[in-house]
Image (cartoon, helix red, strand yellow):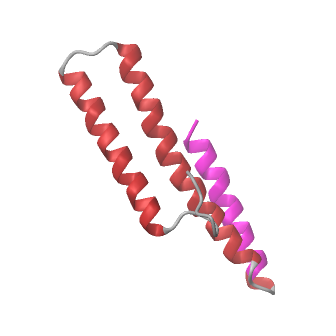
Amino acid sequence: MATTASGPPTRDQIQKRLRRAEGQLRGVQRMLDEGASCDDVLVQLAAVTAAVDQVGLHLIGERLRQCQQTDGTLCAAGLEEGLATLLRHTRLSR
């Protein structure tokens, strides 16, 4: 997912990316209805998965960046929560 010149993607850019992934998923459904080849469908499914994963990783990164900007014990707890979320996300995306 591209970042803006001033930093990470905005919420609007994230929403746009999710809408694009939603359109790709509808395209996969159409491909199935039309009897597209298994390989073609799997390529499109991989594209949808990658798009959604990028959004998830961005959101986790934002959580970790917010923790980095905070001092004290809350930051340590927030970092641990963010890392746990990252590990769960990476296991789910395999």
Q: Quadrant of residue 90?
A: top right
* Residue at x-position 26% and y-position 38%: 26
Residue 48 position within the rendered picture, expressed as x and y whole percent measured from the top left? 42, 38
Q: Quadrant of residue 16?
A: bottom left
In the displayed structure, 92 sits above or below 57; it is above
Q: Which residues are magenta?
A: 75-94
Left or right, 92 with reference to 39: right
Residue 3 position within the rendered picture, expressed as x and y whole percent measured from the top left? 59, 59
- Magenta segment's dominant SS is helix
* Residue at x-position 36% and y-position 14%: 38
Verify whether residue 34 appears in magenta: no
Q: Quadrant of residue 15?
A: bottom left
Q: Residue furthest left?
A: 33
Q: In which quadrant will I find the C terminus?
A: top right
In the displayed structure, 63 sits above or below 47; it is below
* Residue at x-position 73% and y-position 83%: 74
Question: Quick one: 19 or 60, which is closer to the camera?
Answer: 19
* Residue at x-position 41% and y-position 15%: 39
